[in-house]
Amino acid sequence: MSQPILLLNCGSSSIKYQLLQTDTQQPTAMGIVQRVGQGSSTLDHETGGQKFHLDQDFANHTEAMAAVVAMFHEHGPALDEVIAVGHRTVHGGDTFQESVLIDDAVIATLIELSDLAPLHNPPAIAGIEAAMLVLPNVPHVAIFDTAFFSTLPPEAYTYAIDREVTARYGIRKYGFHGTSHQYVSQKVAEFLDRPLSELKTIVCHLGNGASISAVDGGVAVETSMGLTPLAGLVMGTRSGDVDPGLHKFLGSKGMSLDDIDTSLNKQSGMLGLCGFTDMRDVATEIAAGNADAKLARDVYVHRLVSYIGAYIAILGGVDAVCFTAGVGENAAHIRGPVIERLKGMGFELDVAANEQRSTEAREISTPDSKVHVLVIPTNEELAMARETMAVIGR
């Protein structure tokens, strides 16, 4: 029996959506609205092998969601049978450690938590309110990026700052991309045909946003992102880890806190280092002799190797290291150098397997490797659908 779930991922100026059939675990429609509130908005909708495009300015998420619903009505599939709507929600703070049914109290709490994720939570709230307005008769569920990392031990999530400040403002490491890390760590166990409870796994979620996690027996024990999604690895436009004193130093040079925050979130990372955020462009530039691109790639790899080494120590060994998300799944020129630098720890790369492009889960280490190195496509939408089903009791 068909039980479709509408899945929404709302950014500050975008709405990504997918209609997923829970019986087949396959999408029957997907799309994206871009430039919401910025003028020249667009809506792209795909279903049944056909693509539909709309140019229409949407002043806010409410108008954009109404257009999405209209697109479904005009081109299908019908939304009449939708049993629930699942919303990707980045920051749940200490309050939400698992997916929840959304009501007015939940929305009010998300608003209170917006200071912890000012770039992510406000658009998610706007998307939730817009979706509840146009689809009022089905349950809406919030799925939190932070939930999987609620299991971090105190030694991992506690910052070495004044404990009274910590308690007053809820300051701690929260972690993000949890839906992906949980899904992929489970897929590693399936791929290796071993019990999840027995595996020590490191998951490298490498996309425009990037994070890494240490998972022991299916339980997250460490991750790179922190209070906000800015910490950790080098990303497309985000710096990842920097000296905390950098803020005061740049402030003394005349930059405001907002300027510094914008710089670290939107003008740093690969973009700041070499002018490119797409790793395909970086590879092309390296081949053309661009020294900045090569340095950017080397910094990216160095940071990632440093985290993998640290997490092996925290786990007390590792059974598998897995690459996932856009860069992790497709950038052989990132995976290769990472594994080569880990040879001293028993990693052996199958060069041919690493270079082969595929959308399937695969192993890129040799039979002699002491650690399984895997590439497993993430499927956050399917994970969100499963969470939504669990919350509504289906």
Image (spheres, rainbow, N blue to C red):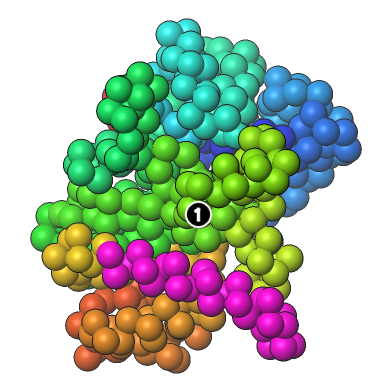
Q: Which residues are magenta?
A: 284-310
* Secondary structure predominantly adopted by residues drawn in magenta: helix
Please tell me which residue is depicted at 70% across the width and 20% down the height of the picture. 62
Vertical placement of residue 218 versus 152, above or below: below
The picture places residue 8, in percent across and down from the top left corner, at 56, 34
User: What residue do we see at 30% from left, 40% from top?
Assistant: 160
Q: Residue furthest top?
A: 104
Residue 377 can be seen in this image: no
Q: Is residue 264 shown to the viewer in this render? A: yes
Asked where in the image residue 386 lies, by quadrant, the reply is top left
Q: Residue furthest front?
A: 252
Q: Is residue 369 magenta?
A: no
Q: Is residue 287 magenta?
A: yes
Question: Which quadrant, please, contains the N terminus?
Answer: top left
Q: Quadrant of the C terminus?
A: top left
User: Residue at image x 66%, y 66%?
Assistant: 273
Report which quarter residue 232 is drawn in.
Answer: bottom left
Q: Quadrant of residue 153?
A: top left
Which residue appears at 48% of the width and 47% of the height?
Answer: 244
Give the residue type at disc 1.
Val
> In the image, residue 30 lies at what x, y percent?
62, 44
Report x, y in % for residue 269.
60, 59
Above or below, comparing residue 185 to residue 55 in the picture: below
**What residue does disc 1 label?**
242
Closer to the camera in the image, 77 or 228: 228
On screen, residue 269 versus residue 390, left or right, reads right
Position above or below: 277 against 367? above
Question: For mark 1, does the 10 Å Cα neighbourhood hold few (<14), some (14 to 19), or many (20 or more) residues?
Answer: few
Instruction: Compare residues 264 and 162 and report the one nearer the observer.
Output: 162
Label 1 SS? loop
Q: Is residue 153 left or right of residue 278?
A: left
